[in-house]
Image (tube, grey):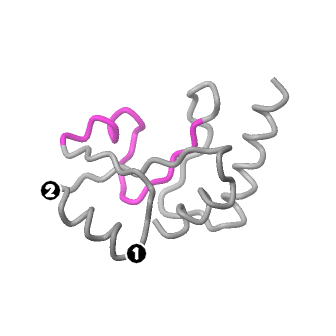
């Protein structure tokens, strides 16, 4: 989550990050966000609809969706800042040329 917050700050208004939690209760999620000063919005998906829609089988999974709504990259775990930055820049460049 901390790395995703960093990416949101780095790419400012050019990307949107949404975290998805499968926790039963929102209170622990809210405490975690507050304790780490995170502003990333979190979708509470206990029924698992979003996870099913994106084919998520392990937690954490990172899914990058392009400007058309197509899944372009999927990573089980966090891919690292260099990889994620490269993938985001490629998607942003592609979005700006269309």
Distance (Cα) linking label 1 and label 2:
18 Å
Label 1 element class: loop
- Residue 25 placement (x, y as % from top left): 14, 56
Front position in the image: 61 or 43: 43
Tell which tag, 1 or 2, sits nearer the viewer.
1
Q: Is residue 52 left or right of residue 47?
A: right
Residue shown at 42%/71% (left/top)?
A: 37
In the rendered structure, the answer to whether residue 86 lies left or right of residue 26 reads right
Tell me which numbered mark, 1 or 2, is placed earlier along the sequence.
2
Residue 16 horizontal/vertical position (percent): 56, 44
Residue named by callout 2: 25
Disc 1 packing (10 Å; few <14; some 14–19; many ≥20)? few
Quarter of the picture holding the C terminus? top right
Residue at the (38%, 45%) spot, across then down: 56
The magenta-colored residue range is 47-65
Instruction: Tell me the tag on residue 67.
Output: none
Q: Nearer the viewer, residue 98 or 59?
A: 98
In the displayed structure image, the side of residue 88 where residue 17 appears, left or right? left
Residue lying at the far bottom of the rendered structure: 35
Q: Position of residue 5 (x, y in %)?
A: 53, 63
Q: Which mark is residue 36?
A: 1
| Residue 47, x across and y down, in percent | 19, 40
Is the C-beta separation of discs 1 and 2 under 8 Å?
no
Determine the image quadrant of residue 92.
Answer: top right
């Amino acid at each position: 989550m901390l790395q995703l917050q960093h990416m949101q700050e780095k790419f400012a208004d050019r990307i949107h990050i949404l975290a998805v939690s499968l926790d039963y209760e929102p209170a622990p999620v809210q405490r975690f966000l507050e304790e780490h000063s995170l502003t990333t919005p979190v979708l509470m998906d206990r029924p698992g609809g979003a996870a099913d829609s994106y084919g998520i089988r392990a937690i954490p999974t990172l899914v990058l969706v392009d400007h058309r709504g197509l899944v372009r990259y999927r990573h089980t775990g966090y891919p690292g800042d260099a990889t994620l930055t490269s993938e985001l820049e490629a998607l942003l460049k592609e979005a700006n040329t269309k």
